[in-house]
Amino acid sequence: MRFHLGSFPESADFIPDTSWRSFEDQEQSIWIWQLKAFPIAIINMGVIMLIWIILTPVEGMLRDISFPLPLKGFLICFISVLIVHELIHAALHPMAGCSPRSILGFWPSRMFLYATYDGDITRNRYLAILLMPFIMISIIPIFVAAIGQVLNVWVVYITILNAYLAGGDIFSTSTILKLPPNTIIRNHGSNAYWKEKVDRD
């Protein structure tokens, strides 16, 4: 894995030819993309809260959860969850994120942390990359708490916060699901391209 400061890096060894198709709205700004993902982020938070209420006796703890936390606590929690969230994305890359093609980046002017892969990725792996942080940080802890009947206010808060952060991932998932199962995807700067993989005899 390597670190990149700035916007999404372009692939030095990739020149999209006519076999590659670009995603719709790929030229939209990161702000517009986040605005489109915002409603999904809010719905995600509501769904996670509802699951907590249904599966665990969390109602008695809700009065102890303050939104927002004191600024220092909120920043530490937010940054920590964001970093772990992106590292989980990277862990699903080929070679478990240890490849030099795996990139953890920070875009200062957009205050945007991201993990991206500078190579071909299959559609199904791409879906797993998008969804795994939501599953691991927001879903699994709820079922562990439900089975063990052990509750912690910080765990509840983190699962809800991560559900908000995963809004963009869920938004992107809806686009990737429309592609054929044998699709391969390639990120190139802020753009992304896809094509169907042709099996040769």
Image (cartoon, rainbow, N blue to C red):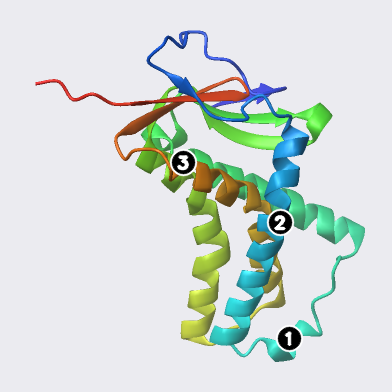
Numbered disc 1: secondary structure: helix
Whether residue 101 is visible, yes or no, is no
Q: Mark 2 to mark 1: distance in Å?
A: 26 Å
* Position of 160 relative to 53 (above/below): above
Examine the rendered structure and indicate whether residue 46 appears above or below residue 12. below
Residue 117 image offset from top left, x and y in percent = 49, 28
Disc 2 designates what residue? Answer: 39
Front disc: 2 or 1? 2
The residue that appears at 62% across and 71% down in the rendered structure is 48
The answer to whether residue 79 is seen in the rendering is yes
Question: Which three-letter amino acid code belongs to the residue tagged 3?
Answer: Ile
The residues bearing labels 2 and 3 have C-alpha atoms spaced at a distance of 19 Å
> The C terminus is located in which quarter?
top left
Q: Amino acid at mark 1?
A: Met
The answer to whether marks 1 and 3 mark residues whose Cβ atoms lie closer than 8 Å is no
At mark 3, the secondary structure is: helix
- Measured from the top left, where is residue 93 in percent x and y? 43, 36
Query: Measuring 43% from the left and 45% from the top, which residue is drawn there?
Result: 177
- Which quadrant of the figure has residue 155? bottom right
Tell me whether the residue at label 2 lies in contact with that at label 3, contact meaning CB atoms closer than 8 angstroms: no
Tell me the kind of residue under disc 2: Pro
Q: Which quadrant of the view contains residue 180?
A: top left
- Disc assigned to residue 61: 1
**Front position in the image: 60 or 127:** 127
The residue lying toward the viewer, choosing from 171 and 139, is: 171
Residue on which the image places disc 3: 176
Q: Looking at the image, which residue is at 83% across and 59% down? A: 74
Lower sequence index among marks 1 and 3: 1
Q: Residues within 10 Å of mark 1 (few under 14, many from 20)?
A: few
